[in-house]
Image (cartoon, coloured by chain):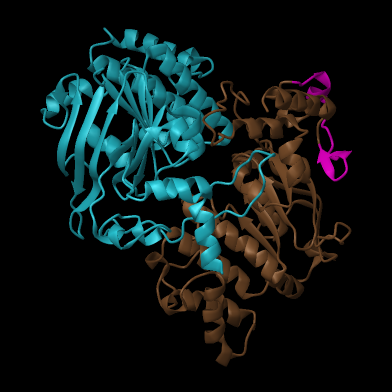
Chain colours: A cyan, B brown
Amino acid sequence: MSALLSVRNLRTRIPTARGPLTVVDDVSFALEEGECFGLVGESGSGKSMVCKSILRLPPTQCAMTSGSVEFAGEDLLAMSDRDLNRVCGRQISMVVQDAIAALNPVLPVGRQIGEAMLEHGIASSSADARQRSIALMRKVGIPSPERRVDDYPHEFSGGMCQRVVIAAALACAPRIVLADEPTTALDVTVQDQILNLLRALRAEFKLAVVLVTHDMGVVAQNCQRVAVMYSGRFVEVAATEDLFRQPLHPYTAGLMNCVPDIDAHAERTRLSPILGGPPDPADPPSGCRFHPRCPLATEQCRTGEFPLREVMPGRFTACVRHADLAAAGNVWALASAESSA
Amino acid sequence: MTIEAAPLLEVKNLSKTYAGRGAFLRSLMGRAGPPLRAVDQVSLEIRPREIVSLVGESGSGKTTLGRAILRLVEPSDGEIRFRGLDVRALSQKRLRATRRDMQMVFQDPYSSLNPRMTVRATLEEALRVHRMRPADQIARRVDELLEIVGLNPAHAGRLPRDFSGGQRQRIGIARALSVEPAFIVADEPVSAVDVSVQAQIMNLLLDLRDRFDLTMLFIAHDLSVVRYVSDRVAVMYLGRIVEYAKQADIFARPRHPYTQGLLRAAPRADPLHRSTTVAIAGEPPSALNPPSGCHFHTRCPIATDLCRQTRPLLAAAASEHLVACHHADHAVANWGASAAANP
């Protein structure tokens, strides 16, 4: 089966006053039709930059990007801006975290939803675009869309603005939606509504979604496969069930250990957090970038190169000690017992 | 913990009302808009060494309640007793002494620290103003405070911008601790930091409670965080507390339909049990024009005419379990049935 989108060896470097930062470092993945692929990691791990690099959005547009992003037989990174504009918003669209900032405050929401349809020739006239916008607003669960289509973003709540942004992303019936933390700014009940909406839309339109999040719960509930990012790199890729059953990278295991369980039957045990903080992107550690925080790190981890390898069918990890990790049980609990002893 | 201990903090019928939008102009014309009741007749008791969480959606009034308790915003009505003292009746001088005993840790550690003051200067100021140490011991105390919160005293000369988000939150905690308070209001102290750092900060707060016998009001919106740190949990909706119970009871036998919905809405880190239905439909109504009766009736699956007409009062439904719902028995039976269906 050929993938809908193939990202190969993507590397994005952004020039800054402190020299170029490698924000995405040799990332490869394939997105299948209708799939929800999760990108999980902490802030600064490069997960949003992966999405932005795919569509060459700022600040990656002037970046030194290498690798390829193949969609429908063409490389998005190699095509002209004009050709990319035919794809961007039409075949691949994006939903961002801060919906209120993403919307133009002085334009009615209906116009913003309809804009892409007029641009890409989906709608024949402004009146047609307006009618289609109303239908989309209804689809994403905005009450009385006929009345609200001419309202401005400030007249909507944060959750409703996120629905408007989703409607705009769906306007041209894209094949792929890149959803960059679409619910992070929302209350938990509204997050639940938006994620249910995305699931329903995925099924209805056979949409493939790249879902960027820092929340392992959101991954567990929504994604078929997931990539864990750390310091610009993929450190583990697996089917969601496999990842949660047995993580094969200490960072993944650590992330799972950081989040308290809300299940009333689960025992309330002390969390064993990952110690320290994420690395400085301008000066990442040598070898495995996670080694300064890793309880399993050895001398080898400080110097070697650790590319993502397939260690079991469908399971990729960058950790050379993944077998020891699987055997060791909760390495984080052991590590934190040692550090406090 | 002794259950019978006298409460350290008692809040009775506390309200905070803000004038409605355009109130000034309208009042000139004799037509003031409706007031906004951010906190609506809240009663709450917190015992010594207890961590009570205040949980709810944005706009539920949890931050306003926390600030009103410390008189950082002046309450409109009601009573606050701290160690039996009526905080609202205190003279300025007595209030200052009581303030020392009641501190706050803010959500955004960066905007709550002076960007031009070194960490040492920030902590020294608090120690000096409240005369916590003789002048010659202040420097040593600053080092000690930094060690207590897990920071390197050698970095005391740095500015807030030189620290990461998690480290800044530790500085904010050190500042609160500097005056040796008995009670801390921690307003979303972990919601602005990454998950790995979140666990470090929560463990720090739990350790500090044990070490210094602290009592805390912990404001949060994340239920997993709440379950981890709390002894008891108060759930707020549109300015009112709708349920108040021990942590284990809130999570195992929630009795208010809103609490139940919040629990169902939180995404579980378990791909084998995926939810497929929306937990609570709709959005919180405007606090400027809240629904009649029970504020939650517009989103509640079991609301009746009674709920639309009459405000349910917070009352004991079981031992140490307060709930403000006319149909709490019905709700808890529903919860039991759904738990049995999805073990």
Q: Is residue B161 above or below residue A212?
A: below
The structure residue drawn at horizontal position 35% and vertical position 44%, both measured from the top left corner, is A229
Q: Position of residue A262 (x, y in %)?
A: 63, 40
Please state which of residues B125 and B186 is positioned toward the viewer in this rendering.
B186
From this view, report whether residue B84 is shown above or below residue B295.
below
Image position, residue A189 (x, y; %): 59, 31
Is residue B81 visible in the rendered image? The answer is yes
Q: From the viewer's side, name the closer residue of A260 and B325.
A: A260
Quadrant occupied by the N terminus of chain B: bottom right
- Horizontal and vertical percent for residue A283? 26, 61
Residue found at x 26% / y 15%? A118
Residue placed at 30% from the left, 15% from the top?
A: A172
A274 with respect to A119 (left or right): right
Question: Is residue B315 highlighted in magenta?
Answer: yes
Q: Nearer the viewer, residue B20 or A238?
A: A238
Q: Quadrant of residue A202?
A: top left
- Residue numbers of the magenta segment: B302-323
Give the quadrant of residue A101. Answer: top left
